[in-house]
Image (cartoon, rainbow, N blue to C red):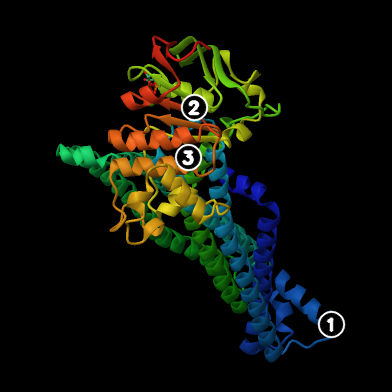
Amino acid sequence: MKFLITFLRRYPGKSLTTLCAMLFAGIAEGFGMSMLLPLLSLSTGTGHGATHKSGSTLAKTITHLFTSINLKPTIGILLCIFVASIVVKVILVLLANKRVGYMVADVATDLRLNLLRAVFNSSWGYYVHQPTGSITNSFATEATRSADAYLFGMRAVAMLLNASVYTVVALMVAWKATILAIFIGSGILYILRFMVRQAKRAGRDQTIVLKSLLSFLTDILLSIKPLKAMDRENTAGRILEKKTMELRDALQRQVFSKEALRALQEPLSTIFFAIGLYVALVLLDLPLPNVLVMVYMLAKILKALQRAQREHQAMMIAESAYWSLLNKIKKANQQKEIFPGTRPLRFKRSIRLKDVTFSYGDREVLNRLNMTIPKASFAALVGPSGSGKTTVVDLITGLFFPKEGDVLVDDTPLREMNIKKWRQKIGYVPQETILLHDTILFNVTLGDETIGEDEVVEALKKAGAWDFVSKMPKGIHSIVGERGGLISGGQRQRITIARALVKKPELLILDEATTALDPKTEQDICNTLKDLLDQITIFAISHQETILREADIAYSLEQGKARQIKGEKV
Ligand code: ADP
Ligand code: MG
């Protein structure tokens, strides 16, 4: 219920018009069906006066209606009205269904876009702890299941609306029998409620298992090579298989509760039907036309209520996916990266880390660190693994902020500047090179259409990648990872360097970006980069001798502090 209300709130206009169309469809059908009573009275030969004798409110209302418009209710006219009403109903139902169908696509799209924006705009500290698979799962499965839940919910409401219209007609034929029948019918639905709850639990298990399964699967796939090389993929495989079996179990329980509900609805509702009829025929001693109309109406009410319950059950199965997805969006939004700084960007002299202290939770990584990278210089940072080199980079790019102290660009603290503008000046080559399964061109431009192919070639040349790319059969249009585009680790690294260079950054950060290169290639890249030093500042983290030799200024990072080991004192 809460689920439907949330949705109706989220899409009030569209949902309301759809529900109105559904309601009017029900009314049209009810109106058509109410013609059955006089029709039956006429055909049993008692003439149109007989409608009066049957004594029901419905008969009286219809006779009144016909008298007021001065029309004689013949069998032909009544049949025409009946058929016309059903046609109107069918048209309205079609319109409503089309609308719901479109809305289902809208809902899924809306949720997906919200998720994408929330995740992309979330802070690095949040993002880094999100399993990739859990995000793709939300984007794919959970969004689809949420939209389905909405569809089932709307159908359940539509069925309830139909049932209420039929009930009004039935009440007008024989109110006592109807009330009794509805009372018993609701009781049956109430008894079967546990089936709905069971399905809901199975749906929730599906949501939980799918999330952990996909998170794990994605992580395994990203690191499958060492697992295969050590013949350890099966250990991971077994965990995946176990989770897959759990998923099967949840799916089977869903199917079972669905089928059980359907199966139990049948005998129980037949009893309800029989009781209604018994009351109408024996206790109330109604005339035959009224009884026949009641049989028809009760059957209709019954079918609508049963379907409403089944749709409700289907909604409950899918509902948990919506809450899970919504939670993900909400959490990411709470962790939104905020850029309060507005001070204009000026990078003329240096980047300076001043008394910077930083920790991940309790673990302190940097302690009153001081370091200066003069503009237009080639600066290097060395230090043992885990000493905090990458953390220094993350502070310079504004992905993290110091706990104490400041990162200053010229003399402006980074947090007071427009950080997005600052990042646009940065070319960054990370420690791990992961290329997209796309063309080399796309891997360099990342889809930025303002970058021309000649600029891509130029960047590839600077990064020392042009010699092997130009030899590929399709050149920059070769797809990375496919036949003709299979490249080595060092070649991948050079493509990532080209990606960082293509936007002509003012600051180039290389985080152990040349580790996979042979000394000659590394030297060549260093030489080309040094030629650019009037336009660019280079900050390289490395253990390679080449980098240290070529650097103008170098620091060593130990125990949270930086010590200058090369270059003039700054
Ligand atoms: P380096 O790049 O010098 O190898 P890092 O800057 O990546 O070192 O990490 C420094 C220390 O901080 C490491 O000991 C690492 O365990 C810890 N660390 C890095 N990233 C995180 C994180 N997101 N959460 C918690 N601890 C982290
Ligand atoms: Mg590192």
Amino acid found under the numbered disc labelled 1: Ile
**Residue 518 x/y as whole percent:** 27, 36
**Which mark sits nearer the N-terminus, 2 or 3?**
2
Within 10 Å of the Cα at label 3, are there few (<14), some (14-19), or many (20+) other Cα atoms? many
Q: Quadrant of ligand 1?
A: top left
Residues at badges 2 and 3 in contact (C-beta under 8 Å)?
no
Query: Where, by quadrant of the figure, is residue 553 drawn?
Result: top left
| Disc sitting over residue 69 in the figure | 1
**Residue 190 x/y as whole percent:** 49, 48
Residue 181 visible in image: no
Q: Nearer the viewer, residue 472 or 82?
A: 472
Q: Is residue 210 above or below residue 539?
A: below
**Which mark sits nearer the N-terminus, 2 or 1?**
1
Q: Which residue is depicted at the point 44% across and 53% down? A: 441
Instruction: Tell me the residue that label 3 is attached to.
Output: 500
| Disc sitting over residue 125 in the figure | 2
Q: Nearer the viewer, residue 43 or 73?
A: 73
Amino acid found under the numbered disc labelled 3: Ala
**Which mark sits nearer the N-terminus, 1 or 3?**
1
Within 10 Å of the Cα at label 1, are there few (<14), some (14-19), or many (20+) other Cα atoms? few
| Disc sitting over residue 420 in the figure | none
Q: Nearer the viewer, residue 142 or 338?
A: 338
Query: Where, by quadrant of the figure, is residue 87 drawn?
Result: bottom right
Residue at disc 1, secondary structure: loop
The residue mark sitting in front, 2 or 3, is: 3
Image position of 11 (left or right of 123): right
Mark 2 CB within 8 Å of ligand 1: yes
Query: Where, by quadrant of the figure, is residue 383 drawn?
Result: top left
